[in-house]
Image: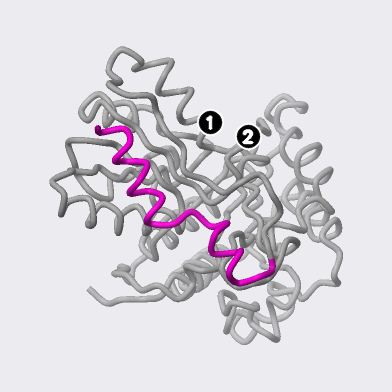
Amino acid sequence: MRTLTFAQALNEALKQEMRRDPTIYVAGEDVGVYGGIFGVTAGLLQEFGEDRVRDTPITESAIIGSAVGAAAAGLRPVVELMFIDFIGVALDQLYNQAAKMKYMFGGKARLPIVMRTTCGAGMCAAAQHSQSLEAWMMHIPGLKVVVPSTPYDAKGLLITAIRDDNPVVFIEHKMLYGIEGEVPEEPYTIPFGQADVKREGTDVTVVATMAMAHKALTAAEELAKDGISVEVVDPRTLTPLDVETIVNSVKKTHRLVVVHEAVKHGGAGGEIVASVVEEALDYLDAPPKRVAAPFTPVPFSPVLEQVFIPSVEKIVAAVKEVVT
């Protein structure tokens, strides 16, 4: 099978869906002429024209607000917030309007909005351009939260998101755009709420999201040298969360480590651990552990940033703690 980068897989998903459905349009800062700062929307303006690919002013509230109105009126907007750090500017439009309209109107309103955005550190972009804020979005009823880690997952999940009649927050870790993987040429979907077991194992379950899924797989290779068999589970979506697959894995391995780049305090890892404890406490042979960032803004200093980001070494150390 051919290989694509993460960014190319997303680009192909957008093009295939826009060809299929003329009600889909793309809008955001620099998505048209520039093709997106990470190249995800490259070529869309040339193929679909200015009516369906709109460069917007630097005003996130208008980007999301206009998408809410367009979606309620029958279009299917795919809008881009350049960095998730800017989501606060449009929070009312997202969590008070898009997330609630279907519920408040008795199911009569459809809000098929995809909000694509980037997260994560690793580029020395400092505290206002490097955050991982997925836990904010998990806490809002009415929003679906998607966190792909591979090109294959990125394409399939984005197509699913575009076809969904509910608002979806689609979060892309900026350090993943250049990774390559096998991606089918034809359109395909990946159901939300269906985790992927990236590696089978018997001694410990490691649940990891986005860029951390790759570090977890690297850690699993290192731990295998010491005779420790690690099962790596990638949730792929945080809302809905596939608790069943995670719990079944823990019932097999009897140990749990959760890894995410967001700060530990109030992060998605706490929800995952709580879900496992509620459903499989008696299967645990050791207390669950979380590997996450410290409760501090993301440093600008390259040296400090690398300390901030959870490392393979920290994952290895956490696994060894729960298996000994």
Magenta stretch, residue numbers: 300-324
Look at mark 2 in the image and give the residue it sits on.
266
Relative depth, front residue between 181 and 158: 181
**In the rendered view, does 30 fall on the left or right side of 90?**
left
| Alpha carbon distance from label 2 to label 1 | 7 Å
In which quadrant of the rendered view does residue 34 lie?
bottom right
Relative depth, front residue between 260 and 118: 260
Q: Secondary structure at mark 2?
A: loop
Residue at figure coordinates x 42%, y 39% from the top left:
258
Name the residue type under label 1.
Gly
Visible in this render: residue 211?
yes
Q: Secondary structure at mark 1?
A: helix
In which quadrant of the rendered view does residue 306 lie?
bottom right
Residue 235 screen position, x and y as percent? 41, 42
Tell me whether the residue at label 2 lies in contact with that at label 1, contact meaning CB atoms closer than 8 angstroms. Answer: yes
**In the rendered view, does 248 fall on the left or right side of 28?**
left
Question: Around disc 1, counting alpha carbons within 10 Å, would you say few (fewer than 14), some (14 to 19), or many (20 or more)?
Answer: some
Residue 79 lies within the magenta run: no
Residue 108 screen position, x and y as percent? 71, 31
- Tag shown at residue 270: 1
Q: Is residue 211 above or below residue 208?
A: below
Q: Is residue 96 above or below residue 159?
A: above
Residue 59 screen position, x and y as percent? 86, 64
